[in-house]
Image (tube, helix red, strand yellow):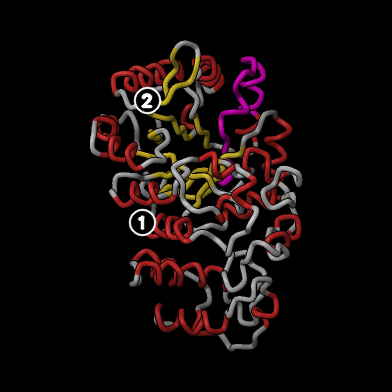
Amino acid sequence: MKYRELKRCGNLKVSEIALGCEGFIDKTAEEFRGMLDKALSLGINFIDMYTPNPLFRDHLGAAMKGRRQELVLQGHICAVWEDGQYLRTRDVKKAREAFEDQLRRLGTDYLDIGMIHYVDGESDFEEVFHGDVIAYCKELKAEGKIHAIGLSSHNPVIARKAVETGLIDVLMFSVNAAYDMQPPSEDCNALFDPASYQKGFAGMNPDRKALYELCAREDVAIDVMKVFGGGDMLNAELSPFGVAFNEYQCIEYCLTRPGVVSVMAGCHSESEIEKAVSYYDASKEEKDYSLVLSQMDKFIFKGNCMYCGHCAPCSVGINVADVNKYLNLCLAQGQVPETVADHYKLLEHHASECIACGRCEGNCPFGVGIIEKMKKAVEVLGY
């Protein structure tokens, strides 16, 4: 297992492969404990808890008893249980009762991340960030009941507005190769609609690209939901592309996006948890999402660096994908942020060492003009 830092959360380290909670729902207490034991044994330490289901919370509290410090818990604020079912609310009285119930059932006095549950619309954003919800989150953070404020969203425009407030430490966002083609929408169901993909797209949606780059610059950690598109990405008949990806390609795609620290895999059994973690044992070819993306006629990626790593190996050892990533962050900002400059400095080799041999361009499945990119990086980053 590899770990990445939540830099705005005291450099707390979370596993790259994490767990969504939907696969734990309706499990017996014994089955639940077995799955958590398996996850911890494989190095998974991060779990999202969007569901307010009281039985889920009871089972998790029992399963993690005596080992709270081994887990990074992400709980959702404004997700409540009412009349035997889930409800999203902006009623702070209900949200407060649900949050306190969550702590009691889990047997803990804090959550690592308090995630504002989900904000996709403009009016909802205004209500949350200019009303009682954000005030309540600040109160919880000041009291130490949450150590970081998060927000979940499917809309890159709204997510970006939230990040720009400076109040959000962690963003839970829906990421996969199909959704990244889609324009922003307040209706998350559009992400699943096959009709939305019929005419194709010309590369990644610029609002999504801008969101990822903003999070990377501001050290707002992205943890990924919908990595498999609810399973659709893994099925050729259901995939919006008409082609099935494998689990490793989906995970690799997400982990190579700027700002992403972790992927919340929706595992329903111990064997599925093992399958997700076997990502680390998979071959480079098994993880190679570019093999699928570069062969799609209706989805045009030409000229866009997808950070797939096919440019390697560089004749002089430059990590071309990382250089392109840092260059794009600077170009999007219109300046060189200090954090980006520091990361670039730590690279073993820099763009100025490029000998323009063209080896990388011959390897690139997306036709990126890498030599010109290296020249631009020298111009922007200085070496």
Decide: few, some or many residues near mark 2? Use Cα within 10 Å; few <14, some 14-19, many ≥20.
Answer: some
Q: In the rendering, which numbered label is found on residue 306?
A: none
Answer yes or no: is residue 312 visible. no
Secondary structure at badge 1 equals helix
- Could you tell me which residue is drawn at 63 percent across and 57 percent down? 199
Mark 2 is on which residue type?
A: Thr
- Could you tell me which residue is drawn at 57 percent across and 70 percent down? 304
Image quadrant where residue 98 sits: top left
Residue 20 colored in magenta in the image: yes
Image quadrant where residue 152 sits: top left
Compared with 201, 264 (above or below) is above
Mark 1 is on which residue type?
A: Glu
According to the image, label 1 marks what residue? 218
Q: Nearer the viewer, residue 59 or 171?
A: 171
Say whether residue 7 is left or right of residue 137: right
Ranked by sequence position, the earlier of labels 1 and 2 is: 2
Whole-percent x, y for residue 238 in the image: 71, 43
Compared with 26, 249 (above or below) is below
Q: Nearer the viewer, residue 228 or 61?
A: 228
Secondary structure at badge 2 equals loop
- Provide the residue span drawn in magenta: 16-37
According to the image, label 2 marks what residue? 89
- Could you tell me which residue is drawn at 46 percent across and 46 percent down? 185
